[in-house]
Each structure stands twice: as structure tokens, then as C-alpha cells.
Image (cartoon, rainbow, N blue to C red):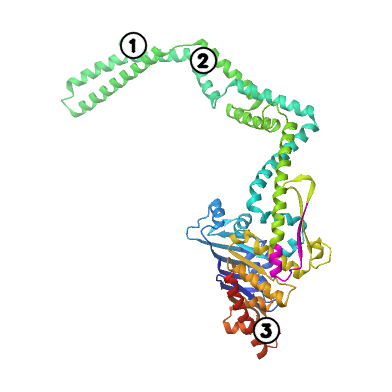
Amino acid sequence: MLLELSITDFAIIEHLDIEFQAGMTVLTGETGAGKSIIIDAVGLLVGGRGSHDLIRTGAKKSVIQGNFILHNDNPTYAVLDDLGIDHSDGNVIIEREIFANARNSCRVNGIMVNIASLKRIGETIVDIQGQNEHQELMKPERHIQLLDDFAEDELQPILSSYQEKYDKFIKLRALNEKKHQNEKQWAQRVDMLKFQIKEIEAADLHENEDTELTAERDHLNNFQKIHDSLLSSYEGINGDDSGPLDSIGSAMSSMQEIEDLDPDYKQISDNLSGAFFTLQDVASQISDQLSSLEFDQDRLDQVEQRLNTIYQLKHKYGDSVDQILKYLKKIQKELADMSGTVSEDQDLDEQLTTIKASLIKDAKKISDIRRKSAKELENAVHHQLADLYMDKAVFEVNIKQNTALNRLGADRVEFYIQTNPGEKMLPLVKSASGGELSRIMLALKTMFARAAGVTSIIFDEVDTGVSGRVAQAIGNKIYTISTKSQVLCITHLPQVAAMSDHHYFIEKKVTDNRTTTTITELTAKQSVKEISRMLAGTAVTKLTKEHAQELLNLADEEKVKISQD
């Protein structure tokens, strides 16, 4: 749930620090006081669109911070793990800054994230329900997603499999269209790729082979030069006619006879000994090289032939063996894409036919699940609407078949409703009033299992267009939801405010010609006064206070009933 919210220089808010609790919290106040601005700030924390126009006049940036605490099984943790964000203390601290130059900065537990990642995290933490959600109900194309959310447990596995096949089908269809647009070019390209792959693979190249062969060829080509140089060096050191090694050996023997007479003689004797033995080692090494040196004309011919093969491939496919091998991988992938991933005797047309048949079969299963779930959804909505004093309304999920498959299957879904007996069933978008939309949306939210996984649910004036006993029913329904998840609710209805566990009053003040918004958590006595204002407007009387207290007493009774259900 949302524990703390800090807002600085956002719209007309200079600075607010708010602590929230579990249960149902209502935010009330005069129109324009800034209630929705607070909800907008929470929306930005969870990935909503930000604009520099939201920065308070005269400030350089807006800063919004929120501290959330989650249950151990909350799906947010999986998203954080995927993004490499530590959450070992169980807290999720989100900070968002909006700068005057339109730049945004987002951090989650101190780690910078982009807006897309913030939205991934946010949608698992907070569910904001408001006028936008009413608008979503007014979009028939969104109805299929609402039905699929309701049927998620049974539908998701097969729908995911279907969509994976569908994506492959679209890719193959594009390839097939490209192929048929110019069969001759396609065939020529395939033949050329096969030829190039065969030619390169036949060469059986390995990395750095050209460098290694060049070094070996140079060695073989310089055989005579190497032999002559080694022989000349050996003879120069250890020649038959008193070579340098013999001369140094004689000098070493002479110095050894007097080395004990003077330290300087000893030093000279040691140096001569070192030189003698070093030259002796060198002469031995040269002799070994001469003994092992062998000229292999056949090997030279093989190396030259291999280098010539590589040269021909370089001329066509790259400046080095490594580049040729990279090119080979590239054209192998291209050929695989053009040929498909099945055996060579099955062309693209056959693949498309096979996959389309499988898609049609899966789409039928998806449609069957939707039709079964639609009946369950209708019954569930009727039950919820009865609690909201729309027991005479008839809700229907209309499912029709599209002429072509799409990524969601073959169904077209639209909600219909009959609000009064004797009227025709009409599309929801054409017949439902604002108050009816509020209740339908609340009914859907109450029963959708997805809401149970979200730590905080925010209702932003979802009670618009209702009053009286319907307002009380909406208050009861929102309180019911708050028993399973933290609820923050902006309302103008005293019946809804009376059902709250915590009541905050939002007020707008003008100081030194600057408008600011303040928030105060109300005591029980103050809550009576605020509900009295909501009932009567500016003229709060003893009678309205009594009425407000009666509302609160009735709300306590309703809470007991709800807790016992």
C-alpha cells in the first residue's frame, strides 16, 4: 500500500507530505481545491504522462515521491527483479522529477528507470479508477480486454500460445507476399545464397587461418636464406680453423692461471668464462636448428594453394577469414528466413496453410472460453448491479465473429445493456448515463480478480451522477473493496465519505497573492463538520450536523454487516 506521499511544486501545490493507512481513505474539499491534483501526482509516480506545464509557477522542477510497502507475493517484485532493482527491505520508493525543459527523471529504490519501466512497475502497484475508466467503457474495442481480464486464468495460456503462432503467421505471410511479388528475383536470391554458403562451407575455414598460413609460407620461402645464415653463424662461432670459441677458450684458460693473484684478474676471468659458455650454448642451439631444418616443397605448394583459395573468397566475401565467416552467418540466417524453419520440401505456402489451420482451431477454443466466461460475467455483473440499485438492468456480453483473424482471435466483443424493463437491449455506449456508467464500472472493478493483486486502488470521483440510496450503495461497495486492498477515494458524496476509515480535507488558500493547497487529516469531530458541509453547503446548522452524525452511525452499522458477509 501507499504509506507516504510527498509533493513539491506541482500545479498549485507548493509542498505536501501525506501519510496514508490501510483501509478506506476519502479526500474531500471544495471543487478546485486540488483533490484530483493529488491523484494526478500518484498517477505520475506510476508511469503517467508528465508535462512541464504541471510545474508550479516560478519553480524549476516538480518533485513527487512515494513510499509503497507490498505483500511478499506481490507481482511487483518479479518486475523489479527483471529490471535489476533491489527490494530486500520490502519497500518500493519511487521518485519522479519533471523539469522546466520537459526532461523527466524517474528513480525506483534509487535506480534510474525510463518511463516504460516505471509504468511496468506502477501498474502492479496502483490501480487508478476515474473518469478515464468511464471513457474506456465507452470504447467498444476495449470491451474484449475487459472480458479477457475476467477470464484470465482459463484464457491466458491458450491466448498466449495463439498469439505466438499468430506473430509467426504474420511474419511468414509477409515473406510469402514478398516472394510472390517477384518469384524470379526470389528464386535467384535463394540460389545465390545457397551457392555462396556452399562455396564458403566447402573451404572449411577457421579463424585467423590466413594469418597462420602466411607466416608458414614466408618461413618456407626463406628456407635458403635461413639455412645460409644459420650455417654462417655457426662457422663464425665454432669454425674448424681456430674459431672465436677456441680463441676465447684459450684466453679463459690463461686468465684462470692468474685469477687468484688479483681481484681484477678474477673478474676478467669470470667474464671470459661467461662469454665462453654463452657462445658454446648459442653454437649448440644453431646446430640444433640446422639439424631440424628441412625444406618441404610439397608443403609449400599446399600452403600456396590454400592461400589462393582464401584469396578468391576474400575477393568475394570479405577482407579477412573472420569477415568471411561473419558473412557466412549472415547469409545462412537470410536463407533460413526465406526458406522457413521447416524441412526443405515444405514451402512457405504449405507452412502458412498449416499455421492458419492451427490458428482457426485455437481461435475456436478461445471463442468457446469467452462465451462461457461471458455468461459468468453477466451473472456476476447482475449480482453487483443489484447491490447498486440497478437490479432491473440487464447486462449482456455480445460476441460476434470477425471475418478475419487478428491477434486477439476471431471475436468482436461489445457490452449491451437494458437499463429499464421493456426497453430494447442497446450497446452500452449508446444507452448508459453517467451515473449508470459509474455503477457498471464499480461493479466490474469489485469482481475482477486482477484488482486483488494491486496494493492500492484509487477512485477519482467515480460516484459522479448519483445520489441518495445509490450513493450509499456505492459507498458500501467501495468499502467492501477496501477490506482487501487500500483504497483512496475522492468524493463529493457525504454517504461515501461517511464509510471511510480515514478522512482528509483538501483546502485551497491564497497567501501573498499565491494559491496553495493544504491537506488535513480530520478528527471524528471535524469529519462530522465536513460531512455536514457536504450535505448542506456553506450553511451548516445543528440539524445538518445531526444528520451527518446519523450518516456516520449508519455507516458503522453497514461496516459491521460487510465484515460479517
**In terms of image quadrants, where is residue 275?**
top left
* Residue annotated with mark 1: 239
Pick the residue in front: 280 or 449. 449
The disc labelled 1 sits on which kind of residue? Gly
Quarter in which the N terminus is drawn? bottom right
> SS of the residue at dot 1?
loop
Vertical position of residue 498 compared to residue 449: above or below? below
Would you say residue 143 sits in the magenta stretch?
A: no
| For discs 3 and 1, the disc positioned in front in the rendered view | 3
Which label is found at residue 161? none
Q: Residue furthest top?
A: 240
Mark 3 vs mark 2: which is more N-terminal?
2
Mark 1 vs mark 2: which is more N-terminal?
2
The disc labelled 3 sits on which kind of residue? Arg
Which x, y percent locates residue 463?
70, 72
Which x, y percent locates residue 442?
69, 66
Answer left or right for 246 relative to 263. Answer: right
* Residue annotated with mark 2: 221
Residue stretch rendered in magenta on the structure: 381-399
* Residue annotated with mark 3: 533
Q: Residue at x 55, y 58 (%)?
A: 74
Answer left or right for 101 relative to 301. Answer: right
Mark 3 vs mark 1: which is more N-terminal?
1
State how far apart marks 3 and 1 are (Cα).
Answer: 122 Å
| For discs 1 and 2, the disc positioned in front in the rendered view | 2
The disc labelled 2 sits on which kind of residue? Asn
